[in-house]
Amino acid sequence: MYQVLYRKWRPQTFSEVYGQPAVTTALKNELRTGRLAHAYLFTGSRGTGKTSCAKILAKAVNCLSPRDGDPCNECDNCRGIDAGTILDVVEIDAASNNGVDNIRDLRDEVNFSPSIAKYRVYIIDEVHMLSAGAFNALLKTLEEPPEHVIFILATTEVHKLPATILSRCQRFDFGRIPAEEISARLQYVADQEQFTLADDAALLIARLADGGLRDALSLLDQCLSRSHDVTASLVAEATGMAGRDYLFRLAAAIRSRDGAAALTLLNSLYEGSKDMERLCVELVDFYRNLMIMKSVGDPGALIVMSPDELVELHREADALSLESILHIMDVLQRTLDRLKSGVSRRVEMETTMLRLCDPRLDTTPESLLRRIEALETRPMPSTPTASIASSVKPEAEPTPVSQEAAKPEEPKPAENAPSVSVSVPFTGWADVLAYIAKQSPPLYGVLTDSTAVIDGEQLIILTDNELFGALVRSDGNKAVLLGAVQAVVGRPMRIKRGRPNRKEEPSAPADPLSDFLRRSAESGITIEERG
């Protein structure tokens, strides 16, 4: 019967474990010196060797003839543990045995001596799935187990474990395996299995595996079901990388602000049974790649794509600013949270596409900044004076008139005509300050005692605070101020600083009684004050 590659090529000794030299070296040293702990905790992402190392450790502590810390894999104990016939090594899946009763049964079993092996080894996989009561039942046994018992806990989510469990275990962190080491291991497997694996295909599989050797072997198995000549194009086709042009088409519709095109493409994907949550995740990953492309000098090592897609991705990144990319990612992340609890995923994605295509439909501060950026990059309109002058035709030369008729009439002010360069107090300044208080408290503190007036298309901020000029030029405060003014006024305005006109405070009026006594004394009249 055919055995899948990741099971067939599972490491049997610490020397065969790829990508975890720190962990395997420490474990081999403990085995050579006999300084074994009573409880181990193996943490790390999936497919990095946690369960494999746990089984190797269980064999090594019970091996009849260990070799430099590695099990011999030839003695009765090693073969029995591999075959599962030795009941002293117990592997427990905490995902399905996570209750208090399961742990109580385990606690009763540890008191029995091993039947064949030297140690009773309990491997608890996905230990973070245990209930709170199960953890409490395990604490005392985990802290002081019998001398013949060793616990090995494995988990991918160590942050879910209580601190009382962590403090009782010797912890080993399994890092993601580098893509180069995974690629080398795949080439070794290909040589042993006698099939062809191109170097670029092996590296592409290694990047798609995201640091997990087990996932890489599974992807290789998937490619081998199509052909024994594995190339990069075959890997892209087998893993679904080929044919993802809809991501670029959606990105083009968002960039050109074509909501109709985005909704049409979304509808075709929906009718093709495309899951909306999965599509949102793919879009987040797509714009993450654009973010890397804009931020890193050599993005090829951080982006998993075919060479043709990388070229197209580079063109898409050149057409967008980093601020726009971050705003789009933020909107998609919020949409992903709503998709998990929303009623209609299709409607949620449609509204998201419209918000991304038209930032005016999004009221978040990030959307306001994106709109301000679009206004700043828009070319300035040409001066209308020349075009108006060219459109006015010269009139015929006027006929001579009498001197009395030639006198110009006194100009009459037009009704409701706006005066030129007249400053009007800005009544919405309090709303602007309230908006700034949420976005930038330091800027709000500087503008607390300020006022503002509107003069044509510019807003003049009247303040005596000398910190205003320096603060508005740092930490993005200018964008916050411009966004707040546009949100209240409804259109972009230029910002200018002015000095408030402070009149001298009038002196306090003289006391009438004192003034009367003074004038009486000057007239020779003496007035006696009595209490």
Image (tube, grey):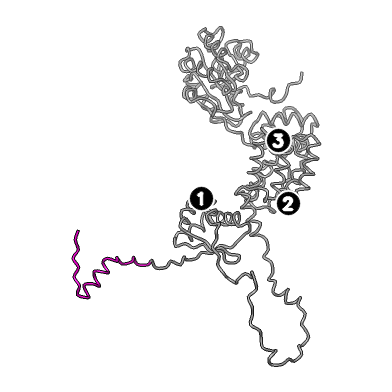
> Which segment did they paint magenta?
506-531
Q: Specify few, some or many for label 1: CA neighbours under 10 Å numbering under 14, 14-19, or 20 or more.
A: some
* Residue 437 image label: 1
* Residue 257 image label: 2
Disc 2 secondary structure class:
loop
Alpha carbon distance from label 2 to label 3: 22 Å
Please tell me which residue is depicted at 60% across the width and 10% down the height of the picture. 87
100 shown above or below 215: above
Indicate the amino acid at tag 3: Glu
N-terminal of the two: label 2 or label 3? 2
Image quarter where the N terminus lies is top right
441 shown above or below 52: below
Residue receiving disc 3: 277
430 shown above or below 396: above
Q: Is residue 42 visible?
A: yes
Q: Is residue 38 magenta?
A: no
Disc 3 secondary structure class:
helix
Indicate the amino acid at tag 1: Ala
